[in-house]
Amino acid sequence: MKISIRAAIDILAFSVFLLMLGSGYFLYTSYFKYKDSEQLVGYVEFSNSLSKLLINISNEKVKSDIYAKTQNSIPFVKLQLKSSRKMTNKSLKEIYKYKDKLDSLKNLLDQLNLLKKMRKKNDNFEDINKYFSNIVNMIIQHQRNILQFSYMKELKSDIDVSIALSKTIQRN
């Protein structure tokens, strides 16, 4: 069977069209996967900043409680509290980078803005545990919300798998 030149050109043009269509689809899907992964990196960085803030707030809470209970009778407690406050302030600066990107941060930022007032109360030996507990709960809720995004379900399941594997390895 003989193929005419016109038919060969048509077949060649159609195969080039299919190749362009396939590569265009691949480019399209790759671009959106890249955008999703870029957004995911942003959320992971935000989650890391929240984790640092959670650690520093908890550390400051403990030292503030010790300071209030001892009423500055132990000399180094005030120094430890000041260093803890510096670390918390550093973590707060990281969180404030995200204030324009996430509307859900408004409540947490409002609570964090009260931190200076609460620190003054603590310096007067008042108990501010409820305030710190409220902040800690809000930070944990934000971290929980990050893991509930639909595109992060795969990451969440990977984290669950890695935690299960590490527990299994520790047992053995």
Image (cartoon, rainbow, N blue to C red):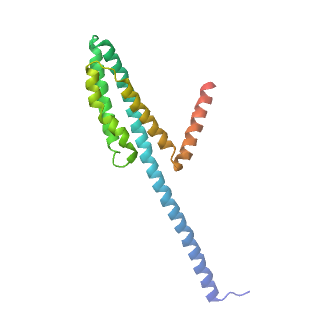
Q: Where residue 147 appears, x then y in whole percent?
A: 50, 42
Answer left or right for 36 relative to 63: right
* Quadrant of the rendered image containing residue 115: top left
Q: Where residue 23 appears, x then y in whole percent?
A: 54, 67
Q: Where residue 45 appears, x then y in whole percent?
A: 41, 42
Observer-nearest residue: 172 or 115?
A: 115
Quarter of the image for the C terminus: give it.
top right
Residue drawn at the location 45% of the way across and 35% of the way down: 140
Q: Is residue 148 above or below residue 21?
A: above
* Quadrant of the rendered image containing residue 107: top left
Q: How many marks?
A: 0
Observer-nearest residue: 5 or 70?
A: 70
Q: Is residue 23 above or below residue 109?
A: below
Answer left or right for 32 relative to 121: right
Residue drawn at the location 55% of the way across and 71% of the way down: 21
Quarter of the image for the N terminus: give it.
bottom right
Q: Where residue 46 appears, x then y in whole percent?
A: 40, 42
Observer-nearest residue: 46 or 73?
A: 73
Most extreme residue toward the top is 73
Most extreme residue toward the right is 1
* Quadrant of the rendered image containing residue 129: top left
Residue drawn at the location 25% of the way across and 25% of the way down: 120
Residue drawn at the location 52% of the way across and 44% of the way down: 148
